[in-house]
Image: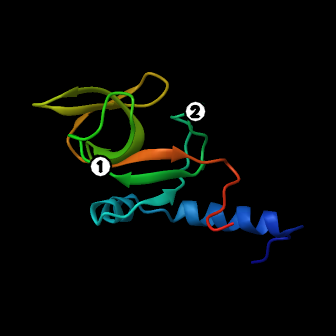
Amino acid sequence: MTFPMRDSREVLFYLDFIEGLRGDPVKTAERLLAGETFVNREPGNSMTPKIQSRQPVRLAPATWETVEVGDIVFCKVRGNYYTHLVKAKQNDRGVLIGNNHGNINGWTKQVYGKVIEILPVDYREGA
């Protein structure tokens, strides 16, 4: 199968799109647990306008104890992975996670990382 591309930007967009389809949140969590800081892109509109779909963000390792209300974290709630906001924090329950539109995912202590930088939509690593 071939795809007509007019220029290199279209090729890069296509490759980013395919990479995003293959994105593995388990591997993202593993990289954060290993202490790695890296750029990640996720599809979805639950964090707009703070983060657009597939907008790159820099993730750094974090735990539920080290994050604060208002931080954007990469976490797991009830079996699903999210890059969402910390809405509340309690020592016995962990952190309450929700999106930027008022929806709540639930309480968790499974926080793997924190967004330390929201990058421009057209950001390219190493460019």
Residue 27 occupies which quadrant of the picture?
A: bottom left
Q: Residue at the spot x=71%, y=53% of the render?
A: 122
Percent across and percent down for residue 9 are 80, 63
Quarter of the picture containing the C terminus is bottom right
Mark on residue 20? Answer: none
**At label 2, which amino acid type do we have?**
Thr
Percent across and percent down for residue 86 are 34, 31
Q: Residue at the spot x=37%, y=42% of the render?
A: 73
Q: How is the image coloured?
A: rainbow
First in sequence: mark 2 vs mark 1: 2
**At label 1, which amino acid type do we have?**
Ala
- Local crowd at mark 2 within 10 Å, few (<14), some, or many (≥20)? few
Real-space CA distance between mark 2 and mark 1, rounded to the nearest whole angstrom? 23 Å
Residue 2 occupies which quadrant of the picture?
A: bottom right
Which residue is most to the top? 102
- Local crowd at mark 1 within 10 Å, few (<14), some, or many (≥20)? many
**Whether label 2 touches label 1, CB < 8 Å:** no
The number of callouts visible is: 2
Which residue is most to the right? 6
The residue tagged 2 is: 48
Percent across and percent down for residue 95 are 24, 33
The residue tagged 1 is: 62
Q: Residue at the spot x=29%, y=66% of the render?
A: 34
